[in-house]
Amino acid sequence: QVQLVESGGGWVQPGASLTLSCVVSGSIFNINALAWYRQAPGKPRELVAHLTSGQTASYGDSVKGRFTVSRDNEKNMMYLQMNSLRPEDTAVYYCNAVKVYAGELYEYWGQGIQVTVSF
């Protein structure tokens, strides 16, 4: 099992920055990828940022150039630096981990954390 706990959410005004953190614990061996997803009210969950075990990052089109995902393997942490936040970034943000073990794929989710961008 892998446990994921997000922190750092809250309310900010448009144009501000915010950093989300995700603690990764448990059976973290063989985690192939970590990611951030978000879900706004009435919308499907969407990929925000993806980070492979080789530290290759990719981003959803709506956040490219504004968000940066990173990982600290020593601290078992993943981060999402969010700059130039917009009202449309308002959503619940989820930490995600994918692990392949014995030929099976396992996916884990954090409980989610609210980010609200408004005046």
Image (cartoon, rainbow, N blue to C red):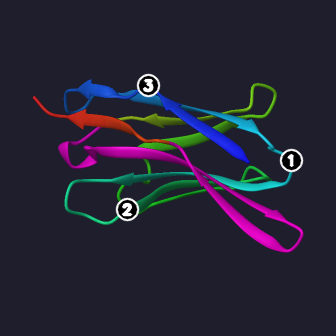
The location of residue 7, given as percent across then percent down, is 48, 27
Residue 107 versus residue 11: which sits nearer the camera?
Answer: 107
Mark 3, residue position: 8
Q: Residue at x 56, y 34 (%)?
A: 5
> Which is nearer the N-term, disc 1 or disc 2?
1
Residue type at tag 1: Phe
Residue 26 versus residue 52: which sits nearer the camera?
Answer: 26
Residue type at tag 3: Gly
Q: Residue at x 43, y 41 (%)?
A: 112
The location of residue 30, given as percent across then percent down, is 85, 54
Disc 1: CA contacts within 10 A as few (<14), some (14-19) or many (>=20): few
Disc 3: CA contacts within 10 A as few (<14), some (14-19) or many (>=20): some
Q: Would you say the magenta stretch is mainly helix, strand or loop? A: strand
Specify the farthest residue to the bottom: 103
Q: Residue at x 74, y 49 (%)?
A: 55
> Which is nearer the N-term, disc 1 or disc 3?
3
> Which is nearer the N-term, disc 2 or disc 3?
3
Mark 1, residue position: 29
What is the magenta range?
Answer: 84-110
**Do tag 2 and tag 3 residues touch (Cβ < 8 Å)?**
no
